[in-house]
Amino acid sequence: MKDINNVLLNPVRMRIIQELAVKQSMTAAELCEKIGDVPRTTMYRHINLLLENNIVTVVSEQKIRGSLERTLALNIGEIVKHNTLENASQNAFAFLMNRYARFHNYFNGENPDPAQGKFFLNNTVLMADDTEFDQFLAELRDILIKYNFEFKNGRKARDISIISAPVEED
């Protein structure tokens, strides 16, 4: 078994997890169609890694034209098992280091162009009570769902990370 953070923080595997979270279950072929910008062999490799690490499970199998079609679903129990208070600091560190590695690779790659790549960083401190913040999060979720378009030519994957953390008082 690989480090769970390395498994979950890969952008292709994260997209697979997001699709399964929304649809509840999908076949591998449906996932390949939905995430059409990723080559099929690459998709199957990522799906198999998620299966090997018990993040995704096979809920049914069906023979179709000599092939075995598997229907997949998230293994919520396994995901929850790693999302504990004891693991919170390690999970946050892995998340932040993953973000750092992506920025590092981007800026050290060939011809980085932040304007063309629509690269930006933003930090905003909101003043809100718990009810107002819950409303903000609900609206943010709705916006992310609204703009989570399906793959088609001309569209490219955009990696957006949002972190909410308490503000340290001086």
Image: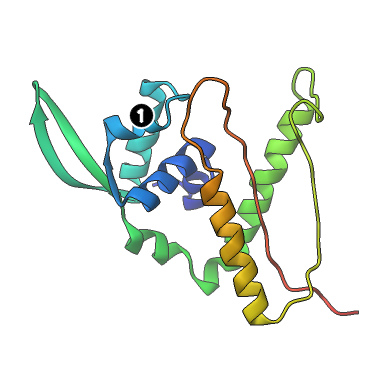
Q: How many marks?
A: 1
Q: Which residue is pictured at 56% across the width and 65% down the height?
A: 138
The residue labelled by disc 1 is 32
Q: Which residue is pictured at 50% across the width and 37% down the height?
A: 149
Quarter occupied by the C terminus: bottom right
Q: Look at the picture and state if 124 lies above or below 122.
A: below
Q: Position of residue 12 (x, y in %)?
A: 48, 36
Q: Position of residue 25 (x, y in %)?
A: 27, 47
Q: Image check: 155 left or right of 167?
A: left
Q: How is the image coloured?
A: rainbow
Q: Look at the picture and state if 25 lies above or below 153.
A: below
Residue that lies at the very extreme toward the right in this rendered image: 170
In terms of image quadrants, where is residue 104?
A: top right
Q: Image check: 15 left or right of 132?
A: left
Q: Position of residue 18 (x, y in %)?
A: 44, 47
Q: Nearer the viewer, residue 14 or 51?
A: 14
In terms of image quadrants, where is residue 136?
A: bottom right
Q: Which residue is pictured at 28% across the width and 30% down the height?
A: 29
Q: Secondary structure at mark 1?
A: helix
Badge 1: few (under 14), some or many (20 or more) residues near its Cα, within 10 Å? Answer: some
Q: Nearer the viewer, residue 82 or 70?
A: 70
Residue type, numbered disc 1: Cys
Q: Position of residue 93 (x, y in %)?
A: 65, 57
Q: Look at the picture and state if 132 lies above or below 105.
A: below
Q: Which residue is pictured at 52% across the width and 45% down the height?
A: 6
In terms of image quadrants, where is residue 67?
A: top left
